[in-house]
Image (tube, grey):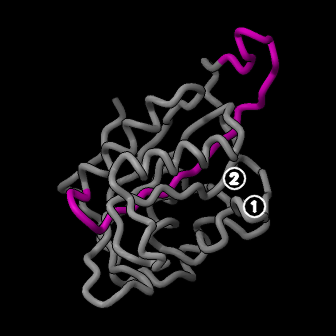
Amino acid sequence: MTETPNPHIVDADTLTGEMRPIRRVVVSLGSNLGERLTSLQGAVNALADTPDVWVTEVSPVYETEPIDAPDGSGKFLNAVVLLDTTLAARRLLDRAHAIEDAFGRDRSSGEFHAPRTLDVDIIVVGDRRRNDEVMQLPHPRAAERAFVLQPWYDVEPDAEIPDTGLVAELLEKSDRSGLTRRDDIALQVQ
């Protein structure tokens, strides 16, 4: 994956002068409960409003069948957002959870694939690797999920998941059945 930071971003903390690297981040969005499109657009807006985050691309929206979900779960709307940031991965994860919470994400059921108003998953943060109880980078199932790979490929065809492979090659191997591009709807960057 190429890291192409926005050339207009100053990568030093203006108060302390501390240098922080600019990293390309891939975020996957999904919703299969409530006002799905409103939730996805709200997530894009919230990411764009986050200090030290610059949204650079938003993929087309796809409608997908739920995977490993309880019976009766509705279809997902999915998209991928590319952004540049100087935030640490942990702070970005905290922001992703806060955005989910703001859109009514309920984790109380304890069911792993339960329907959700909003899912904000961090797929990659530059070339960072992390595997602990807090987060895993790259996202451990992204390479198997067409609902992540296809929209990511649409906005960054030469992308690569560190230690895994090119998104284009992973997409060719993935199950794309149940994946429908929704050209009738689109997400906007403010």
In this rendering, which labeled residue sits more in front, label 1 or label 2? 1
How crowded pointer 2 is (Cα within 10 Å; few <14, some 14-19, many 20+) is rated as some
Question: Considering the numbered disc 2 on the image, is that residue within a helix, a strand or a loop?
Answer: loop
Question: Considering the numbered disc 1 on the image, is that residue within a helix, a strand or a loop?
Answer: loop
Q: Position of residue 146 (x, y in %)?
A: 48, 73
Q: Quadrant of residue 18?
A: top right
Amino acid type at circle 1 is Pro
Label 2 sits on residue:
1
Which stretch did the figure color magenta? 10-36
Report the residue at 81% width, 21% height from top: 19
Report the residue at 32% width, 43% height from top: 42
Which mark, by number, is residue 162? 1
Q: Quadrant of residue 188?
A: top left
Q: Is residue 169 above or below residue 30?
A: below
Which sits earlier in the primary sequence, circle 1 or circle 2? 2
Q: Is residue 187 above or below residue 21?
A: below
Q: Is residue 179 left or right of residue 111?
A: left
CB atoms of marks 1 and 2 within 8 Å = yes
Q: Nearer the viewer, residue 103 or 121?
A: 103
Q: Nearer the viewer, residue 59 or 77?
A: 77
Q: Quadrant of residue 166?
A: bottom right
Find the residue positioned furthest to the left: 184
What secondary structure characterizes most of the magenta part?
loop
